[in-house]
Every structure is written in C-alpha cells, then in structure tokens.
Image: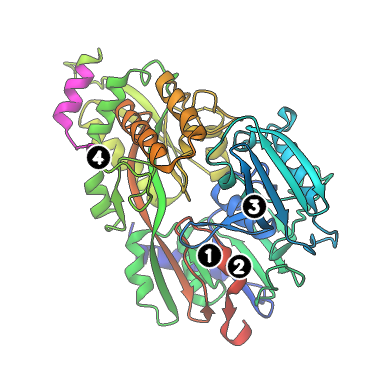
C-alpha cells in the first residue's frame, strides 16, 4: 500500500492521542520497538545495543570510520602476545556518583565470563585467563592464547561492581543517564553533567516507541518527533524529501541482510535445498523495485570497504531453472498434480518492508515449487523465536560488523545460543579450525588469507543467503544540528547534537 493511502488513517490515530509537550532542549527519537534489555552484558538486539551504548561506555569504541579508539581506557600496552596492560582514565564517575575504577572493569568482565551468567557476549571474553588489578586505575589482562580481535571486544559497556540485573535501573558512566522506561510507550534519558567526555549539549533524549511507520513519520512531520532513522521504507523517501521542515541524510552502512536456515530441519539440512532456495530468490528485482536501489547485493557479511573483504566470491545468480534441477536432485521432484514439492514456514517481523519482501520471497519460491507460509510477529516475539532456534527460515540484518571474528560468533559450531549467534546450528569442522586460527593470528595479512577462505566456504555452504548491504537513512527536523550517521548505526553523535531554538 502506498504511503499516501495510509495518511488519513494515521492522521486519525494521531489525532486521537494528543501528544504531551516536549521538555525544553530534549530530542525526541521515533523508534519501531523498544529495547528488550538495558544491561550491556546481555543486550543483543539493535535498539538495545544503541541505547545501552549511550548509558554505558566501554574501554574502547568505534569512531565514524569504524576505527577502534580509546574510550574509558587512557592507554593500552601489549606486553606480549597474550598480555595487555590497560590504564583507565581517572576521575570518571558513574551516574550514581561512584568513581569508576579497575575493580568495576574486573567485575564486568568476570560477570560475563561466568557460565552462570549465560551472557551471549561470553565468547567475546572467553580467552581471558586472568585479570590482575595493579592499581586503582590500572589492570593487566592475560589471555590463554594470542587472540587477535581481543581489543575490539573491549567495547562492551562497564557496569558498577556488584551490579545485578540492570534493565530496571541502569547505571553507567555514559553521556546520558537513565530516567524511565515505559515498555511499548517511551524511554527517557537525561544528560550526564559529569560525563568524562564533556556534558552533552542536549538536556535529554526521549525514545518514542511508534511501531507503525506511517504514524512515526507523521509525528516527525508534525514536530512531535525530531529524528527517525533506520528502518525507513525506501518508497516513502521521496515524500519525506518534499517536506520543507525536514532534511534527509544518507550514508553507506555496514548492515547486511540475510535469510537464515535451520540446519537441524530435515528438509533444510540438505545443501541442495538451501542452494535451490538461494537461486530462486531474485535479489536484484527486490533491490531495484522495493528497496529503490538503497541497497547493493552482497555475498559476504564483510563490506567491500573492510580490508578483510573477499572480493573474489562468486556472485549468486537468480536462476529458477537451476533451482528446480537442484530440488529434483535433492529428492523433491515436481508433482504432477501441481502440489508443492514441500512447504516451509518463514518468520519475519511486522515491519511493512520486511513483510512485503517476505511475500515476494514466497512468490519467487512458488515459481520453483516451494510453498512458503509467512508468519509475522511483533519484534519481541519474533526475535525470541530466532534466538531459541524456533524457525525454519527467517530474515534479519547484522549491524555494525567491523572485525571478521564475527564469523566465530555466528558460525562456529560452539557458538549456538546462549554462547553466540549460531542460531541455525551450522557445523563445519574446517570452518571451526579456520575461525580458531583467525583468532590466534596476529599478522593482518595472514588473517586476511584465513578469512578469505572462511567467506568462500560459507558462500558455498549456504547457512545464509546473503541478500544486500544497506544505505543508512535518517530523516530529521531542520532544528537538529550535528547528527551524524554512523556506518554501524551507532547513536554516539547524539552527545554532540543541538536543537535550534532549544526545542
């Protein structure tokens, strides 16, 4: 349905719910769904990760170019291949006034590493053998073996020592501190006057949860929302660009969308079936007509701008004839009565664009004899099903991939939830060996060779159908000054944003 056809309904809905006045100098951000968790040790969904990074800084962070830079860390020294000496910035205060010290870093990492915590980020720190506190602001971390991506994993937010579950009352040391969270409605943050990087220019942030995109964008047009970023349906961008009160910004991103398979499924464990599905999907047509060329087809989770990208991967072709041949060879011949070869269930969220794409997938698979039942759910239910392995097929997007060690988190056989994101239970002994070698190899050139091979094998095994890389889009009021789109969708620039007129 076209965006304009939804305007009347959306205006009616909005008019039935008069908005409360926006506090002075407070930026209102329209989001599709609220965060599931506000504890940096457990937050994995995109919006939870974005918001927790504003509350809890890590020892390091990614800048706009995805380079790794110190955050809470004042310096890091590599004593040998397994030993890191880290000195913290002094005088950093948590939101409750307590000073942040090496003890808090120790507690944060130990609470993640502990098997009892069931943290999905445990694999990021599992190579730690020992943490020694040297002085109040200095600690030494010794690893069990050389681990090339180790520093990149120290972006996890630091929490106060002794903290238990933090979602109800988050306490960090970031630029914004927690005020309140009403699930399904809004989340409020207030600037941290004592932030070690300098207090934000805004007094506060309100994340307004508006699941319906049309309502979100109309609230933006009316001025009740200042900023809306991904996801934005490509077909509505021309309408947004015509609004005099708004401005649109676009930047190439690192978001990789994919179709995931359950490798334990009796049908999908067959490589020829997965390959047939991949060749039945017309990515180019969807990119052109649905995504309005705001995406580019990809064969890898690594972006072309990343030094670890394998540029020699064979491009996946849309080939229905090959798809039918593979299905025949897999033991699922075409049936004379016109019945489907088999039926699969495809899960997605209620996002309109994702639902539309799911319908197109269904039609494309129907052309080769596969019936696709589409089930869409609210984000929380959908994501819970995916994490628990309760699916046959689904589609999601990885955000902010910088280091190739992400392949260990997603595809190593030991990275099944809760120890990682191998939700489809993919197993390949050679891939496991390569991923372990890639973690130990400190020479970037040798790491490149390893991850080139990993990308090649994954492209042939089809645990995923890689779809496309996205262009990040943000629509905002012209009052908003200083907002920058990061490739990984980080909201780090919010600490530098100002509102013209203070509202």
Q: Are marks 2 and 1 in contact (CB under 8 Å)?
A: yes
Q: How many marks are shown on the rendered structure?
A: 4
Q: Are marks 1 and 4 in contact (CB under 8 Å)?
A: no
Q: Earlier in the sequence, mark 4 or mark 2?
A: 2
Q: Are marks 3 and 2 in contact (CB under 8 Å)?
A: no
Q: Earlier in the sequence, mark 3 or mark 2?
A: 2
Q: Few, some or many C-alpha atoms within 10 Å of disc 4 (few <14, some 14-19, many ≥20)?
A: few
- Disc 1 from disc 3: Cα separation: 53 Å
Give the quarter of the figure containing the C terminus: bottom right
Q: Are marks 4 and 3 in contact (CB under 8 Å)?
A: no
Q: Earlier in the sequence, mark 1 or mark 4?
A: 1
Q: Which residue is mark 1?
A: 13
Q: Of the residues tagged 3 and 2, which is closer to the observer?
A: 3
User: Where 72 falls versus 326 (above or below)?
Assistant: below
Q: Few, some or many C-alpha atoms within 10 Å of disc 3 (few <14, some 14-19, many ≥20)?
A: some
Q: Earlier in the sequence, mark 4 or mark 3?
A: 3
Span shown in magenta: 313-328
Q: Which residue is mark 4?
A: 312
Q: Position of residue 493 (x, y in %)?
A: 56, 68
Q: Would residue 383 appear left or right of 297 to someone viewing this image?
A: right
- Specify whether residue 338 is in view: no
Q: Are marks 4 and 2 in contact (CB under 8 Å)?
A: no
Q: Earlier in the sequence, mark 1 or mark 3?
A: 1
Q: Which mark is residue 17?
A: 2
Q: Residue at x 64, y 50 (%)?
A: 77
Q: Which mark is residue 141?
A: none
**Which quarter of the picture shows residue 465?**
top left
Asked whether residue 193 is drawn in magenta, I would say: no
- Disc 3 from disc 2: Cα separation: 52 Å
Q: Of the residues tagged 1 and 3, which is closer to the observer?
A: 3
């Amino acid at each position: 349905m076209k965006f304009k056809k939804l305007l009347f309904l959306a205006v009616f809905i909005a008019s039935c719910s008069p908005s409360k006045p926006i506090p002075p100098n407070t930026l209102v951000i329209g989001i599709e769904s609220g965060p599931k968790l506000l504890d940096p040790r457990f937050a994995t969904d995109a919006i939870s990760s974005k918001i927790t990074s504003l509350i809890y800084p890590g020892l390091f962070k990614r800048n706009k170019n995805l380079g790794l830079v110190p955050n809470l860390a004042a310096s890091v020294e590599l004593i040998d291949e397994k030993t890191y000496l880290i000195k913290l910035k002094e005088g950093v205060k948590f939101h409750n006034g307590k000073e942040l010290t090496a003890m808090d870093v120790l507690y944060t990492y130990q609470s993640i590493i502990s098997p009892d915590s069931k943290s999905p980020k445990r694999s990021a720190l599992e190579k730690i053998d020992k943490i020694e506190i040297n002085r109040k602001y200095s600690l030494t971390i010794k690893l069990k073996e050389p681990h090339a991506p180790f520093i990149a994993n120290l972006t996890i937010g630091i929490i106060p020592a002794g903290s238990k579950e933090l979602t109800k009352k988050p306490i960090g040391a970031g630029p914004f501190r927690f005020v309140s969270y009403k699930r399904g409605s809004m989340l409020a943050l207030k600037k941290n006057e004592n932030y070690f990087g300098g207090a934000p220019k805004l007094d506060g942030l309100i994340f307004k949860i508006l699941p319906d995109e049309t309502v979100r964008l109309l609230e933006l047009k009316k001025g009740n929302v200042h900023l809306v970023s991904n996801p934005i349906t490509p077909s509505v961008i021309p309408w947004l660009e015509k609004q005099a009160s708004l401005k649109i910004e676009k930047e190439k991103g690192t978001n990789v969308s994919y179709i995931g398979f359950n490798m334990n499924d009796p049908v999908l464990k067959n490589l020829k079936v997965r390959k047939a599905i991949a060749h039945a999907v017309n990515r180019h047509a969807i990119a052109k007509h649905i995504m309005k060329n705001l995406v580019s087809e990809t064969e890898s989770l690594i972006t072309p701008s990343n030094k670890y990208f394998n540029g020699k991967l064979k491009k996946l072709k849309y080939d229905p004839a090959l798809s039918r041949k593979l299905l025949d060879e897999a033991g699922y011949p075409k049936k004379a009565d016109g019945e489907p070869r088999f039926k699969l269930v495809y899960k997605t969220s209620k996002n309109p664009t994702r639902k539309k794409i799911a319908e197109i997938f269904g039609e494309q698979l129907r052309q080769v004899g596969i019936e696709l039942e589409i089930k869409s759910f609210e984000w929380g239910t959908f994501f819970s099903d995916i994490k628990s392995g309760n699916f046959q097929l689904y589609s999601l997007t990885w955000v902010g991939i910088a280091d190739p060690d992400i392949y260990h988190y997603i595809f190593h056989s030991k990275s099944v939830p809760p120890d990682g994101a191998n939700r489809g239970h993919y197993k390949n002994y050679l891939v496991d060996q390569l991923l372990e070698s890639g973690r130990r190899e400190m020479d970037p050139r040798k790491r490149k060779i390893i991850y080139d091979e990993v990308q090649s094998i994954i492209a042939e095994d089809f645990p995923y159908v890689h779809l496309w890389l996205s262009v990040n889009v943000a629509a905002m009021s012209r009052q908003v000054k200083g907002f920058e789109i990061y490739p990984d969708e980080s909201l780090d620039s919010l600490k530098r944003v100002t509102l013209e007129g203070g509202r």
